[in-house]
Image (cartoon, rainbow, N blue to C red):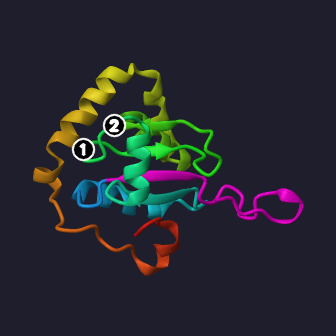
Amino acid sequence: MRVTGPGGRSGDGDAGRHLLLYDGVCGLCDRFVRFVLARDRRRRFRFAALQSPVGRNLVAGLGRDPERLETVHVSVDYRSGTGPVLSRSAAALFVLGELGWPWRLATVLRRAPAAPLDWLYDRVAAHRYRLFGRQAVCRAPDPAYRDRFIDA
C-alpha cells in the first residue's frame, strides 16, 4: 500500500519504507524491535512478527519454511515490492545503518565477509530463547507505536 499526496509523491516520505520481520515470542527480538523503535526518528521501519500472516507469506515467498523462526528479515522498500529481502547479519546491519549516527558506524562490518558474520549471528540465534527468554505469545505493541505494526 502506497500513500500518495498531491503530484503523486509519497505523502509520508520515507516513513514506513522498510518492513522488519521478527520472531514475536523471542525476548532478544522484542528488545531489538524496542531498540529500533526508540531510535528510528525518521520512522523508516514498520514491523510484523514472523508468526503473522504478512510474515508467514513473505517467508514462504522466499522459498523458506514459515515455521522456522530462526532469523530476522528486512524487506527493503517493501511498499514498492522491488527491494531485496535481507536476512541474518545483512538485515541487522541494514537496520543499524538506517538508524543514523552513531549506529551507522556498524555498517563498516558490511565490508567483512558475510560467512563469519552469519556464523556469529547463527550462534546467538541458536541460543536466544535460553539467553533472552521466550514469551508465550507475541507482545502487543505500545499504543504509541501501534500504527507501525502490521498484523499486530
User: Relative to 128, is 108 above or below?
Assistant: above
Q: Around disc 1, counting alpha carbons within 10 Å, would you say few (fewer than 14), some (14 to 19), or many (20 or more)? A: few
Q: Which mark is drawn over residue 26?
A: none
Q: Which residue is mark 2?
A: 64
User: Relative to 143, is 98 above or below?
Assistant: above
**Residue in the foreground of this view, choosing between 103 and 143:** 143
Query: Which quarter of the figure is the N terminus placed in?
Result: bottom right
* Residue 95 shown left or right of residue 6 in the figure: left
Q: Which residue is mark 1?
A: 68
| Secondary element at image label 1 | loop
Residue 59: in magenta span: no
**Residue in the foreground of this view, choosing between 86 and 68:** 68
The reply to whether dot 1 and dot 2 touch (C-beta < 8 Å) is yes
Q: Which residues are magenta?
A: 1-22
Residue 10: in magenta span: yes
* Residue at left offset 25%, top offset 54%: 28
* Residue at left offset 17%, top offset 56%: 132
* Residue 17 shown left or right of residue 96 in the figure: right
The majority secondary structure of the magenta stretch comes to loop
| Secondary element at image label 2 | loop
Query: Which quarter of the figure is the C terminus placed in?
Result: bottom left
* Residue at left offset 67%, top offset 55%: 14
Q: Around disc 2, counting alpha carbons within 10 Å, would you say few (fewer than 14), some (14 to 19), or many (20 or more)? A: few
User: Relative to 18, is 46 above or below?
Assistant: below
Question: Residue 47: horizontal and vertical position, in percent?
Answer: 45, 59
Q: Residue furthest right?
A: 7
Under mark 2, the amino acid is Arg
* Residue at left offset 89%, top offset 59%: 7
Q: In terms of image quadrants, where is residue 84?
A: top right
Report the number of numbered marks: 2
**Marks 1 and 2, how far apart at CA:** 8 Å
